[in-house]
Structures are given as C-alpha cells and as structure tokens.
C-alpha cells in the first residue's frame, strides 16, 4: 500500500537527522581522543611508535569507510563478539575519524616552531609538560580549520552507516521513498537537511582558515 507523503514522513526523516548528528558527535569526540594519541605517536621520538601510528593512519586513510564498517560489523562476530548496527557504526566511524584527526593534528604539532620545544627542554620541562603547556595549545589552534572541515566530511560519511542497517538521515529518506513512492521529495528533503547542517560548518571552517592565514 502506497502511503501519502505527510507530516509523519517528515518527522521520520527528522528522526534520521537526530541520529546522524548524534553519530557524528560521538565519532568526532571519540575519534579526537584516539586521534590525539595517534598524533603523539606519529611525532614521538621512538621509531616503533612512529611506525605503528603511521601504519594505523595509512590503513584507515587508504581503505574505504564502507569497508571499515563492514570489517567491524561482520568481523567482530567472527571473534565471538556480536554487535548491534549502532555499536558497529560507532566503533567504525570513531576509528575512521581518529586516523584522519591524528594526521591533521600531527601536522599541527610539527608546525609549531622547533625552537619553542628546544627552549622548553633547556628549561627542564618534561615531555608531558612541554606538550600540554606549549606544543598542543598552539598545534590545536593551527588545526582548528582543517578539523572543522573534516567534521563536515564525517557528517556526510555517516550516510554509509545505512549499509549495515543503521537508520540515519539517508536510510530514513530511503525508507520513506520506498513507502510513499516519492523519492524526489524524500531524498530532496534529506539533501536539504544535510545542507543545513554542513554549509554553516563549511563556511566557519573557511573563515577560520582565512583568519589564521592572515595572521601568519
């Protein structure tokens, strides 16, 4: 039976917007925490840590996000751990984000003038103090614009979560389109919601980039 496209369908798509935002925020925060460790490993003085962090980044940047979601969703049950679509996409998106954020922040850390860390070492500051008080505040400031830009890509990347059964914005639009036979309206509305979320972030990222470029 074909359903009419009405307020209930709009509300269903709006519910998908909610889960897209929630998934994006969880992946961004979780990926940021893991990504900071990856960035520190990537810039470590220890060669084994640098190699492990580089391999981690190369894997997640060199393989499609869709494949990574499949590996988590279908791979964990092989190891005896059954996961729901929600858990699988959260883990997969977090790992994906951590690799990209780790590389972004690695660039920010290495952009901090080396003389500052050498001066801090001469003053007797330990590694943790140097990173916490001198290097990371400057590195994160330099990395704000590309970090926000990646958040936009992450939000759009959540559309792939539907492939393992997670109902986010794209999946909710697909369900509405299949029940109402109004794909243009359903996907058009989903596209509008993506635009409303991503466009302000894209402009904000561009503004930050221009501001920091003008100061250098």
Image (tube, grey):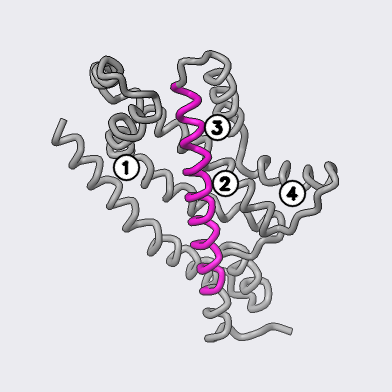
Which numbered disc flags the more N-terminal residue, 2 or 3?
3
Q: Contact (CB < 8 A) between labels 4 and 2?
A: no
Which numbered disc flags the more N-terminal residue, 2 or 1?
2
SS assignment for the magenta stretch, majority: helix
How far is mark 3 from mark 1, CA to CA?
Answer: 20 Å
Left or right: residue 116 compared with residue 73:
left
How far is mark 2 from mark 3, CA to CA?
Answer: 13 Å
Q: Who is closer to the viewer here, 72 or 210?
A: 72
How far is mark 2 from mark 1, CA to CA?
Answer: 19 Å
Residue position marked by numbered label 2 in the rendering? 94
Residue 171 higher or lower than 153, as above or below: below
Residue position marked by numbered label 4 in the rendering? 73
Residue 161 higher or lower than 16, as above or below: above
Left or right: residue 72 compared with residue 50:
right
How far is mark 1 from mark 4, CA to CA?
Answer: 31 Å
Q: Contact (CB < 8 A) between labels 2 and 3?
A: no
Q: Who is closer to the viewer here, 18 or 39?
A: 39
Q: Who is closer to the viewer here, 163 or 92?
A: 92
How far is mark 4 from mark 3, CA to CA?
Answer: 19 Å
Residue position marked by numbered label 3 in the rendering? 61
Image quarter of the N terminus = bottom right
Which numbered disc flags the more N-terminal residue, 3 or 1?
3
Which numbered disc flags the more N-terminal residue, 4 or 3?
3
Q: Where is residue 158 in the image (x, y as percent from the top left)?
A: 56, 54
Residue position marked by numbered label 1 in the rendering? 144
- Which residue does the image show at 58% across and 47% down from the upper left? 93
Q: What element carries label 3?
A: helix
Give, as a single range, the part of the protein colored magenta: 14-43
């Amino acid at each position: 039976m074909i359903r009419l496209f009405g307020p209930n369908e709009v509300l269903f798509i709006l519910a998908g917007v909610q889960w897209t935002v929630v998934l994006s925020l969880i992946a961004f925060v979780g990926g940021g925490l893991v990504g900071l460790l990856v960035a520190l490993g990537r810039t470590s003085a220890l060669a084994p840590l640098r190699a492990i962090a580089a391999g981690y980044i190369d894997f997640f940047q060199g393989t499609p996000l869709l494949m990574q979601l499949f590996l988590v969703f279908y791979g964990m049950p092989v190891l005896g751990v059954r996961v729901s679509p929600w858990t699988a996409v959260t883990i997969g998106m977090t790992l994906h984000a951590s690799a990209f954020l780790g590389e972004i922040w690695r660039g920010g850390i290495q952009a901090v003038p080396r003389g500052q860390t050498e001066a801090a070492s001469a003053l007797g500051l330990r590694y943790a103090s140097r990173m916490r008080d001198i290097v990371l505040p400057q590195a994160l400031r330099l990395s704000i614009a590309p970090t926000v830009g990646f958040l936009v890509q992450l939000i759009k990347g959540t559309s792939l979560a539907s492939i393992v059964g997670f109902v986010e914005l794209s999946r909710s639009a697909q369900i509405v389109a299949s029940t109402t036979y109004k794909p243009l309206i359903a996907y058009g509305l989903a596209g509008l919601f993506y635009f409303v979320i991503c466009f302000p972030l894209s402009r904000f990222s561009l503004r930050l980039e221009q501001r920091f470029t003008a100061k250098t």
